[in-house]
Image (cartoon, helix red, strand yellow):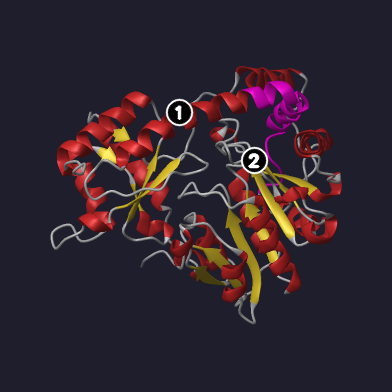
């Protein structure tokens, strides 16, 4: 008799990004030289000063339970950091610690969504967004953004409202496209939602990876009248190269925060205590923390500036310049034919013939596209481009 998987879990799809990463690991285990351009993980190590703070926390005995919402020092440090970096006035009662940005998103969604509520999700989307809605029994209502080059607008949001719309999930800088919604447009989006009593969950995982002339922008900077409709899901994973530490946070109206804390009290309880301590200490050293982030951002920008133009030289590839994150979202529809008739087939071809692992855009709601991560070395990017040019040829220069 098969295992009786719950209806909520059975309705969910596995993460295509994690499947691609697992594929790369399995190939390496077989001794294959893999160029992995699928992983959404910084290739930098966690800054040493953050590691040292974690060791200090252990030495000081931060090994026991904390409050479900997190250490008071952690929540205060988040509030102080946003004040120092953005000028935002955030009460500690609006902040809760979580086990990574992904749990922050789950907590926020599960605390507000009811069965058959509608959730607006712009395409292309991070693979987990619609699965969170599915788990909560809500309906995903997708917003097509290709006509605006994958940059969401307030007009698109307004046109997508249904009588049951409860929540909009937005991600800027975007995974997978790397596009950045301008701050003025983000504000308009929240204003449109607030006028309809629709809430906004903003995934700010890549907040600081915005390349000039774009600037890091957080919805936490909005005035209280608008911010009461917003939940910011923040993460240390990408920004501080701390993916394995599993630490994040939410910033939301105290009532929304209280509901999330209640939920978390019955799941993870709280993130690791000495990790909270390390993050609190790191955020308290604003200058050193921002210097570390800026160093990583500068390197990602250097890679982007070489990699995206190189991709656009490959026959059948088309990719706009991303303004943030560390992904290139490549349109491969021009190269599709009867033999290679989908982006999944192109990804399979790259895997089998060049041992290059990428993520099929179908998992992000965009069949015909591939996501390439440039969170890897320049050597790997150069090797991958050379191999793909050899496979597909280069565009004719006029």
Q: Residue furthest bottom?
A: 163
Q: Which mark is residue 302?
A: 1
Q: Is residue 30 visible?
A: no
Task: From the viewer's side, name the closer residue of 48 and 146.
Answer: 146
What distance separates the C-alpha of mark 1 from that of mark 2? 18 Å
Which quarter of the figure has residue 80? top right
Asked if residue 162 lies left or right of residue 385, the reply is: right
Q: Residue at x 59, y 44 (%)?
A: 205
Q: Residue at x 63, y 36 (%)?
A: 236
- Residue 279 versus residue 182 in the image, above or below: above
The magenta region covers: 268-291
Query: Quick one: label 1 or label 2, which is nearer the N terminus?
Result: 2
**Residue bearing the label numbered 2:** 216
Q: Main secondary structure of the magenta part?
A: helix
Q: Is residue 361 visible?
A: yes
Task: From the viewer's side, name the closer residue of 395 and 159.
Answer: 395
- Give the position of the C terminus as an image quadrant: top left
Q: Verify whether residue 138 appears in magenta.
A: no
What x and y, as percent, mark residue 182?
Answer: 61, 51
Q: Residue at x 74, y 29 (%)?
A: 283
Asked if residue 91 lies left or right of residue 315, the reply is: right
What x and y, as percent, mark residue 190?
Answer: 70, 62
- Residue 68 versus residue 290 in the image, above or below: below
Q: Residue at x 84, y 61 (%)?
A: 225
């Amino acid at each position: 008799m098969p295992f009786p998987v719950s209806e909520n879990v059975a309705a969910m799809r596995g993460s295509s990004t994690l499947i691609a990463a697992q594929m790369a690991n399995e190939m390496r285990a077989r001794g294959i030289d893999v160029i992995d351009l699928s992983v959404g993980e910084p290739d930098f190590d966690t800054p040493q000063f953050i590691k040292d703070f974690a060791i200090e926390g252990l030495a000081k005995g931060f090994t026991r339970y904390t409050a479900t919402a997190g250490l008071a020092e952690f929540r205060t440090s988040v509030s102080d950091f946003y004040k120092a970096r953005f000028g935002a006035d955030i009460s500690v009662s609006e902040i809760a610690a979580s086990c990574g940005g992904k749990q922050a998103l789950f907590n926020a969604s599960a605390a507000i969504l009811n069965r058959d509520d509608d959730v607006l999700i712009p395409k292309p989307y991070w693979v987990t967004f619609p699965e969170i809605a599915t788990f909560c029994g809500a309906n995903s209502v997708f917003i097509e953004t290709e006509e605006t080059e994958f940059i969401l607008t307030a007009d698109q949001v307004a046109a997508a409202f249904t009588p049951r719309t409860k929540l909009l999930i937005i991600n800027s800088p975007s995974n997978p496209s790397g596009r950045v919604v301008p701050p003025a447009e983000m504000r308009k989006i929240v204003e449109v939602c607030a006028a309809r009593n629709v809430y906004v969950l903003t995934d700010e995982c890549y907040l600081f990876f915005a390349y000039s002339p774009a600037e890091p922008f957080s919805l936490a900077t909005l005035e209280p009248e608008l911010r009461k409709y917003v939940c910011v899901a923040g993460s240390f994973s990408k920004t501080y190269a701390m993916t394995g530490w599993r630490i994040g946070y939410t910033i939301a109206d105290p009532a929304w925060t209280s509901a999330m804390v209640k939920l978390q009290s019955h799941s993870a309880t709280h993130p690791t205590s000495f990790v909270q301590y390390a993050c609190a200490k790191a955020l308290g050293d604003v200058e050193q923390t921002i210097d570390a982030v800026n160093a990583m951002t500068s390197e990602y920008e250097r890679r982007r500036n070489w990699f995206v133009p190189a991709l656009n030289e490959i026959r059948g590839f088309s990719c706009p310049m991303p303004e943030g994150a560390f992904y290139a979202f490549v349109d491969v529809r021009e190269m599709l034919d009867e033999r290679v008739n989908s982006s999944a087939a192109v990804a399979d071809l790259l895997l089998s013939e060049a041992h290059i692992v990428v993520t099929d855009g179908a998992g992000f709601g965009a069949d015909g596209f591939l996501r390439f991560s440039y969170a890897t070395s320049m050597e790997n990017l150069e090797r991958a481009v050379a191999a793909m040019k050899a496979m597909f040829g280069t565009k004719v220069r006029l």
